[in-house]
């Protein structure tokens, strides 16, 4: 009977050890105010760019080149904060009326950026980074 008890205790120790090793660990850390502000600023920049691209003339131009909204969002996520801020600034400076020239310039800059990132191949002379 001692061997059964010894085996049962050994199995219990092994099960407890395995259970302890498999338990996920949680790490908590304070999030700084600057990180929260940076995330909010980035969201605001993305919103400005997406608002400019949702205009009919911009959406039509992007559709003609076969650029989907998912691909645009994916590439916006890959932009640095500085690049996104510059793109948002350009989007904000677009004419508010039927300024087709401003929208076309913005879409052209966006397409060049997407070509450089390797999403599209609209301009064969531009070699992609990825």
Image (spheres, rainbow, N blue to C red):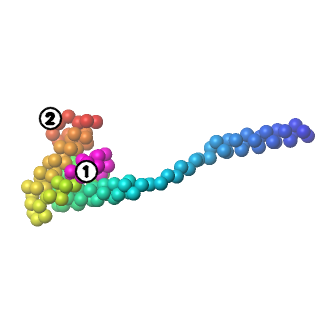
Which numbered dot is residue 55? none
Residue 84 image label? 1
Q: Is residue 90 above or below residue 127?
A: below
Q: Position of residue 51 (x, y in %)?
A: 23, 60
Q: What stretch is highlighted in magenta?
A: 72-87
Which quadrant is the N terminus positioned in? top right
> Toward which corner of the image does residue 98 lie, by quadrant?
bottom left
Asked if residue 11 lies in the magenta stretch, the reply is no
Measured in 3D between alpha carbons, the distance from the residue under mark 1 to the one under mark 2, in whole angstroms, is 24 Å
Q: Can residue 23 be seen in this view?
A: yes
Residue at the location (31% across, 55% down)? Answer: 42
Name the spot of residue 119 as percent of width and height, x first: 25, 42
Left or right: where 26 falls relative to 6: left
- Residue 82: where, in percent of width, then height? 26, 48
Neighbourhood count class around disc 1 (C-alpha, 10 Å): few under 14, some 14–19, many 20 upward: many
Of pointers 1 and 2, the one earlier in the residue sequence: 1
Question: Badge 2: how crowded within 10 Å, few (<14), some, or many (20+)?
Answer: few
Q: Secondary structure of the magenta portion, mostly?
A: helix
Identify which residue is drawn at 18% across, 46% down: 111
Question: Cβ–Cβ below 8 Å for labels 1 and 2?
Answer: no
The residue carrying mark 2 is: 125
Residue lying at the far bottom in this picture: please name it: 97
Quadrant of the image occupied by residue 34: bottom left
* Label 1 residue SS: helix
Please tell me whether mark 2 sits on a helix, a strand or a loop: loop
């Amino acid at each position: 009977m001692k061997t059964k008890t010894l085996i049962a205790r050994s199995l219990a120790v092994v099960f407890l050890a395995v259970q302890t090793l498999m338990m996920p660990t949680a790490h908590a850390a304070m999030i700084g105010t600057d990180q929260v502000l940076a995330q909010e600023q980035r969201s605001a920049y993305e919103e400005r760019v997406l608002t400019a691209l949702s205009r009919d003339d911009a959406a039509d131009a992007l559709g003609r080149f076969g650029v989907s909204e998912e691909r645009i969002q994916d590439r916006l996520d890959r932009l640095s904060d500085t690049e996104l801020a510059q793109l948002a600034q350009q989007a904000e400076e677009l004419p508010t009326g039927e300024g087709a020239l401003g929208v076309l310039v913005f879409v052209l800059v966006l397409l060049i950026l997407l070509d450089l990132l390797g999403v599209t191949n609209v301009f064969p002379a531009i070699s992609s980074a990825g």
